[in-house]
Image: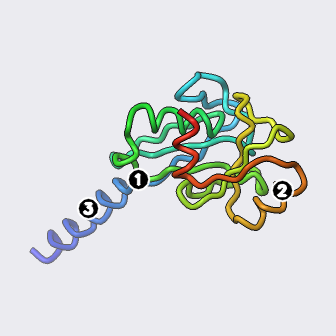
Amino acid sequence: MKTKKILFTLASIAFFAACSIAPKPIAYGDDHCHFCDMTVVDKTHAAEYTTKKGKSFPFDAIECMVREVVRKDIEKDLAFVLVADYGNPGDLVDAKTATYLISEAIQSPMGANLSAFSSKETATSTQKEHGGKLYTWETLKTIIK
């Protein structure tokens, strides 16, 4: 009887560990944008969201993801909303806490010239160097539709 309880406990732990919700790493060069179907190759402008059910969707540009989230009004259904940190290519950061820069001097794959930064200080120094305007997640959603 004790062995059955131990096996049941171990099976339960394995089941729940397998069901944990986490973002899926973007396969640069292989994944396609869920919004526009372009291949995701740019590690400085990619984005991804993961639903509360655990399904991840990659995007080739932050503006593609923002447009989908806003148009479908799905933010409440998402467990993770991530954007590439322009200063650390390949690193994805929380979209809701990132600072955004729209600057014509920094082109993004879909032409919105939108980049994200994990820190406001880095975004501000990049803005001083390249010009443009800074946004938060909330203000960004109002202008990218």
Percent x, y of residue 68: 48, 33
Label 3: few (<14), some (14–19) or many (≥20) C-alpha neighbours in 10 Å: few
Percent x, y of residue 60: 65, 33
Residue pushed farthest bottom?
2
Which of the 4 image quadrants contains residue 6?
A: bottom left
Secondary structure of residue under mark 3? helix
The amino acid type, in three-letter code, at marker 2 is Thr
Percent x, y of residue 96: 53, 57
Residue designated by label 2: 126
Looking at the image, residue 134 sits to the left or right of residue 70; the answer is right
Residue designated by label 1: 79
Residue designated by label 3: 11
Q: CA distance from mark 3 to mark 1?
A: 25 Å
At 67% from the left edge and 61% from the top edge, which residue is drawn?
118
Q: Mark 3, mark 1: which one is toward the viewer?
A: 1
Residue pushed farthest right?
129
Q: Quadrant of the N terminus?
A: bottom left
Secondary structure of residue under mark 2? helix
Look at the picture and state if 32 lies above or below 87. above
Q: CA distance from mark 2 to mark 3?
A: 50 Å
Which of the 4 image quadrants contains residue 45?
A: top right
Looking at the image, residue 22 sits to the left or right of residue 139; the answer is left
- Mark toward the start of the polypeptide (2 vs 3): 3
Q: Mark 2, mark 1: which one is toward the viewer?
A: 2
